[in-house]
Amino acid sequence: MEILVSLLGLGVGGLVNALADSLPTSRKFEKPRCPACTAPRPLSSWLGVVALLSNNWRCPYCDTPRLWRTPLIEIVMMAGSLWLFSTDPHRTFFWPGFLILSIFLLITIIDIEHRLILHVVTGPSALLIGLLGVLDPERGFQKTSVGGVVGFGVVLGLYLLGGVFARLIARLRGQVLDEVAFGFGDVTLAGVLGLSVGYPGILLALFLGILAAGEYSLVHILFMLSRRMYKAFVPIPYGPFLILGASIVYFGGRPLVDRIFPFGPLWFFILLVATFAVIYVWERQRETN
């Protein structure tokens, strides 16, 4: 049975790769093509793992190599499917977890590579994940729907606050600030994540996601400052960090997180206010100097 589960993970990993390649440009599924010359890939190289093992790694028309992302995602899906099956092979646990893992990976890939969170992905995902949550006896309709509304509402508030902050900084700098911390795609993603983890899990998921993004940004800023290459307000994809927080909550990590972070959601708001305050003071000093 483990072999069948592994093959299922491999095949769905290939499907995730194909969708990640085609949806950002055409908004629909297309057969795998070479991104350089757009020639269709032969059937033997549709899967990255198979292409690597069968010496079909390069495009037969333009000799462009495949992205290493393709076998990596397939291996992640294989490992994830095996982990889900070994944790609980019952269909009420395995299939919802497998579907959510696939959706989370697809959104993560597209956001990292294109800085896009597509409505063509989040819309159907919300319907599927919402239905799974309603059918789950541990969450049901109330926790699922409230989680979706809270996730959407909280990040919508951050999105609107980011717009106000961008206008304030633009006034101080005398030029338009095109980038904000959250785009509207992050708002719809937060709604999907809320449906997946329910309420109050979405509060912890958002806290962990924003905390992880803040830590990443701090390390990135320090690294760029050390190389004298720092530029203010360089955007980062927020979706993968939000998905990381939701994954920790959904896939059974909440008891561990509760022990690590016993101080509750108050620090979520303190961290958020402190982050905006630091950026505001930093930019004000730059303008003064």
Image: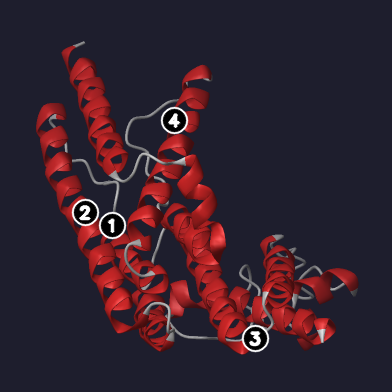
Q: From this view, report whether residue 15 is shown above or below residue 284.
A: below
Of tags 3 and 1, the one toward the viewer is: 3
Q: From this view, report whether residue 169 is shown above or below residue 158.
A: above
**Near-viewer residue (160 or 31):** 160
Q: Residue at x 61, y 86 (%)?
A: 31
Q: Amino acid at mark 3?
A: His
Q: Amino acid at mark 1?
A: Gly
Q: Which residue is mark 3?
A: 90
Q: Which residue is mark 2?
A: 159
How crowded pointer 3 is (Cα within 10 Å; few <14, some 14-19, many 20+) is rated as: few
Which label's residue is closer to the chain start, 3 or 1? 3
Q: Amino acid at mark 2?
A: Tyr
Q: From this view, report whether residue 250 is shown above or below residue 287.
A: below
Q: Which residue is mark 1?
A: 183
Q: Secondary structure at mark 2?
A: helix
Q: Which mark is residue 218?
A: 4
How crowded pointer 2 is (Cα within 10 Å; few <14, some 14-19, many 20+) is rated as: many
Of tags 4 and 3, the one toward the viewer is: 3
Label 1 with label 2: CB-CB less than 8 Å:
yes
Which label's residue is closer to the chain start, 4 or 2? 2
